[in-house]
Every structure is written in structure tokens, then in C-alpha cells.
Amino acid sequence: MNHADAQQRIAKLRDEIRRHDHLYYVEARPEISDYEYDQLFAELQQLETQFPDLVTPDSPTQRVGGAPLKEFPSVHHTVPMLSLEKADTLEALKKFDADVKKQLPGEHIAYVLEPKIDGVSICVRYDKGQLVLGATRGDGATGDDITANIKTIRAIPLRLPQPVTLEVRGEAYMPLPAFEKLNDKLRAQGEKTFPNPRNATAGTLKQLDPRVVANRPLSAVFYAVVGDTARLNVTTHAEALALLKRLGLPVPPHWLCRDMDEVLRHYEQDIVAGGDETKDLRTHVPYELDGIVIKVNRLDQQARIPPKARAPGYAIVYKPEHWIKPAETKLKDITVQVGRTGVLTPVAELEPVFVQGSTVSRATLHNEEEIKRKDIRIGDTVIIRKAGMVIPEVVEAIKSRRTGHEKIFHMPKECPACGGPVRRDPEFVAWRCENISCPAQLKRTVQHFAMRNAMDIEGLGEVLVNQLVDSGLVKDVADLYALTVQQVAGLERMGEKSATNLIQAIAASKDRDLWRLLNGLGILHVGEEAARKLAAHFGSLDKLAAATVDELQQCEDVGPVMAQSIYDFFRNPRNQAVLEKLRRAGLNTVATSRARGPATGPFAGKTVVVTGTLEKFSREQAKEALRRAGANVTDSVSKKTDYLIVGADPGSKLDKAKALGVKTLTEPEFVKMLG
């Protein structure tokens, strides 16, 4: 290919990739599979390598690049990034309306209503259509230049379709499914988890290495255009949102309202849905909401309303009471759990309290640093909420209620499960039990080994695992395969029939695919997806165990940290002994589902969720069939879901799919599409 042909092909590839980025990350309606997208991207990378003079800063290949920074430069905001005044009640919204009318007597006041995303405020500048700056809010006057990190967020275009110069403001966030997946990954790797999506977003944007940011799926929405809006023919806030959308920037859902009465009607109908949790706006968006924002629509009117001390006068945020209504309860104690990697995690033991739909008696405290930062003490009256409407967490202690009898918590000097020594792990900023024979670690290890996305041993749950370990029958995962019906039947609440079923389930797991064994072994930094790729790449346990660190890094998505962890695992004498016992027990150690070529059927590249009970498949069998067909299988319904496969007793996922307009398939329809 000559230079002219390459230039033409590169331009076409860039436009095509940008279009697919917008369809996937902004509109949530991808047209091609991940494999097809990767092919386009690889071709562009190859051509740019061959013709380096054709590389431009706005190329999709330039989203991630450069060495880590030592620190972020400061950025002065020409227009301060202010916070918003808060309203605690609907009556306060009406007062805000009255105050605005006093400032603009006799004028008609229209408003725009939009949700407030609970993320991190950012500003992005474009010069003649090219992204030139991304920054945090900081103190409102000065923020951090995080341009390299902003460029990794694929929802934010590097080049606009028009050569306009403007600054836009919005919110970076981590989608809820991505947040849950990130924490699952961190937890599986024995690393510190994030308490909520906002903290995950803030912690990610503070990373000095943009390559780390690129591996965490952030997104963004924009809600304001700053500067000379008249030059852009923008005279209202609604027009600004329309301009942002035309330029390919994601915007939040919003409603243009004639007056405050219409604001309140939309709030009741479209935001909180009359109190119906299944129709509430929070269940229809992929991010956490922190309230609703009401803004005067006309920009000339905004300019004539005097600002508050730290907030504009033309806007206000209201947090629906039932969204944020916290529960108060007593923190009876702080206990410490030991994970399968030995990490010690503090847990709040609470007086039972009803929070957002269920009774809570325990809540995560994440780590020692979080307890110190919030100054939480045993005996405190604390405020509880559910992060992401699901995970109970302690928000804060009510210090005014203290009596003087509260106790400051200290992490134990010894492992609470085995009495062994603990040490501060500098890599993960956590305390870890150093006793490799710790029964608590062993229990978690066996539970992990037996879980559905590992060896999938039906009937081997937490209670039974505890009995097997406490009785001395199981000292490592390989001991499971030496159990007899008589041994298991002798345990509490285990008759001969239950014992027989368990032994049969354990025996059936011997034929599981290699990736399941790798995931079940609990190698530090190796989760399900990495296990699948390692199995497909090496093909057998023996080849994987013999691989050098360099050879391990030849596998897709295996970096130096994971490679070293895998290498160390297979050279640990204790692990070698367990693996030898597993081989002698007859476990499959080769990959039975090696990587295939790209799928081209109706499920290829589609995001699919399975709910309810199917007749011809177990849930895991259905998921495996979908993966083989090229689908991305997830556990939660969102706007990005293409199909929901519905079995008997589907539960709330079906309601959510209907609300989002997600296509549903019966089991016969699913089987027919599979072919």
C-alpha cells in the first residue's frame, strides 16, 4: 500500500472506529461484535506503525499512551466550577422558584429538570474540535490537569464532528455493573475494594498512569457549555444540551418544563414514579443518582440572578427523601473476617435496622484506613445506607450522640481465626494473616473452589465447608476428592442420601474444563476471565505450570504482576503438592474448549442476561452456550442488554427489561436462535 492509499484507509478506519465507539459507549446500541471492532483497531494500529507520519493526536489509537506522570499540573478555571445549593424538601423547591421570580419580576421562568449523577465533576476543552484539556473541579478555582486520563474514556470523543472551540462540563462516573465487576476482581485478587462507584471513579482519575485508567471502564455525561454561548447560537440550557448531543457528547435524560408546577409533575411521574421502586429513574440508568437538578432554562436569565457564596443562584439540587433516607442504628461491635488470600476485613455488627427494602445487621467497613478516616467507634450511633442500592455500608458516626463509653477499634495483632501472625501488606494497603494453614483462609479457599463459576460443586456451601474443615476431613481442596459417603454422612444434618449426592457432585466436577480449575485454585490476580484466557492459550495445566514469566505475558491481558503471581504459585511446594493430589484424583487438566474463531450467529457481540429456571439447561449451561455463540453474558439487566432469556419464575429482571425496552426470549426462542 502506498502513502496516499494508506492515508485514505486510515481516515476511513478512524471514522468507523469513532462511530462504533459512539454507538457502544454513548448510545448503548453496538452494531458489531467485539471481535470485529478489534480487527478494525488492529488494522489501524498496523497502518499507523507502518506510516508513523500519519499518526495524529485525535486518532483512536492515541487514547492511551505515554509514561506515568510524577504529578498532575494545575489548571485555572476561567469560569469557576461551583457546587449547587441544596433543597431538603419539595417546599424548598417552591421557595427557590419564588426567589427566582423575585429576581426576575414579571418574566416567565422555564426550567430544565435533570438527574444529578453521583460521580466526579470534570471539564473538557476542545480547540477547533480537538480535545486539548481535561481537568478536575479541584477547589472550584483550580483543578488538576488529567487530560491523559480523560482521553481513555471512550464515551468522550477526541475529536468533535465540527471544528468548534468550547469548554464543556460534566460528570465522570463508573457504571454500576462495571463497579461491581471491578470490586469482584479486586476482592478475588486480595486487593482493597472501593466503597462506592464515586470513590472508584475518583480513585481511578487520580491514577498517574493512564494505562491503569484505561483498564477501568469509566464513562461520562455532560450538562453545560461554558464561555461564549452566543457565538454557538445557544441561548438556553435546553439548546446547550441539544448542541452537546449533536457534537457526540453524552448528556443526561432531561425535561424542559414550562414552570415549577411542571417540574414537580415530571418529578412525580418520571423521576420517582409515584414511589414505585421498579419504575423509579434510578433503576433505568447505569449510574448512581445523587438527586435531581433544576436550572433556569434561559441563559440570559441565569446571568441576571445573583450567585450565592459558593453556588450559582439559577440552579438547585434536590435529593428525594426516600432515595437518601438513611437509617440510624447502634454499632454493637466490629468483627474481622479473613478472606481466602488472608486479607483481614473489618465488618460492622449492627442492631438490626430496615434500610431501603431489607433488614440489615452487618455492613462492610472496607478497611482500617476507612474506619480511621470516618472516626467510627464501637458503640457509636451510625448512619447506614446501601451503596448502589444494594451493599450496606456505614456512612458516618453521629458524634453528637457519643457518651464517652465508645471504644476506638484497632486491627488485631493476631489472626482472629487461627491466632497466627498478621502483617501490613504494603502492596494492597491491608492486613494479612501469614499462616498458610489458617482454617478461615482454607474455608474461603474451598468455598471459592466449589463456586458456580469455578468447579461448580452443587451442594457444597458455606455451612458444609465449615464442617468439613473443622472436622479435619478437608485440609486442602484436593481432600474433597478423597471424601467418602460415610465420612460426610457423619456430619451434622447430613444423612446418607445428602452425602451420596455430594460425593456424586464432587466426582462430576473432575471433568470440568481447565479454566474452571484455574479459577477455582484462587491464584492471586487471576479471576474468571484471566483463567479462560490462560486455559485457551496454554491448553494444559502442565504447560501453564512450566511457563516462564515472559511466556506467561504472551497470553492476552496477562501483565507482569499477574505473570509473576502465576509463576510463584506453581513454584510453591505446598501448591505443587495439592496439584499433584488433584492429578492423582483424576481431575481434567487440559482445555476442552480452546479458543474458537469469531462467532457470527445471532448472539455474536450481543449482551445477554439469563433469568428464571430453564427446562433444558441449567443456568450455567445456558451461559456457556451463549459464550460459545459469541455473546457477552452478564448478570444484571441494563440499557446495554440486548436480550433477556426468560425461564420460569423470572423475578425483577423481567420487570426491569420491560421498563428498558430490552427484547425478551422464551426458552424455545433461545434454543431456536442457538440453532
Image (cartoon, helix red, strand yellow):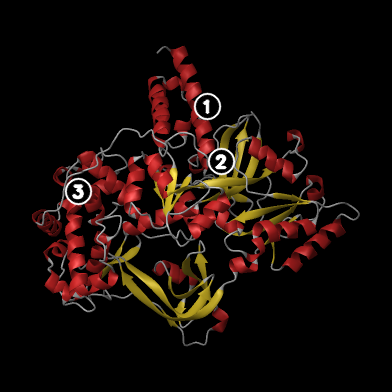
* Residue at x 33%, y 51% (from the top left corner): 616
* Residue at x 18%, y 42% (from the top left corner): 548
Q: Label 3: which residue?
A: 567
Please give the label number shown on residue 27: 2
In this orientation, which residue lies closer to the viewer: 555 or 669?
669
Going from the N terminus, do you reach mark 3 or mark 1 first? 1
Going from the N terminus, do you reach mark 2 or mark 1 first? 1
Element type where label 1 sits in the image: helix
* Residue at x 64%, y 42% (from the top left corner): 168
Task: Measure the alpha-carbon separation of dots 3 and 1.
Answer: 42 Å
In the displayed structure image, the side of residue 209 where residue 595 appears, left or right:
left
Q: Position of residue 617 (x, y in %)?
A: 33, 52
- Residue density around tag 1, few if under 14, some if 14–19, many if 20 or more, within 10 Å: some
Residue 468 lies, with reference to residue 119, above or below; the image says below
In the displayed structure image, the side of residue 439 where residue 154 appears, left or right:
right
In the displayed structure image, the side of residue 27 where residue 489 appears, left or right:
left
Task: Measure the alpha-carbon separation of dots 3 and 2.
Answer: 42 Å
Q: Classify residue 550 by image quadrant.
A: top left
Circles 2 and 1 in contact, beta carbons < 8 Å: no
For badge 1, the amino acid type reads Asp
For badge 3, the amino acid type reads Tyr
Residue most toward the right? Answer: 106
**Which quarter of the figure is the C terminus placed in?**
top left
Q: Position of residue 238 (x, y in %)?
A: 73, 44
Q: Label 1: which residue?
A: 15
In the displayed structure image, the side of residue 318 where residue 194 appears, left or right:
left
In this orientation, which residue lies closer to the viewer: 107 or 509?
509
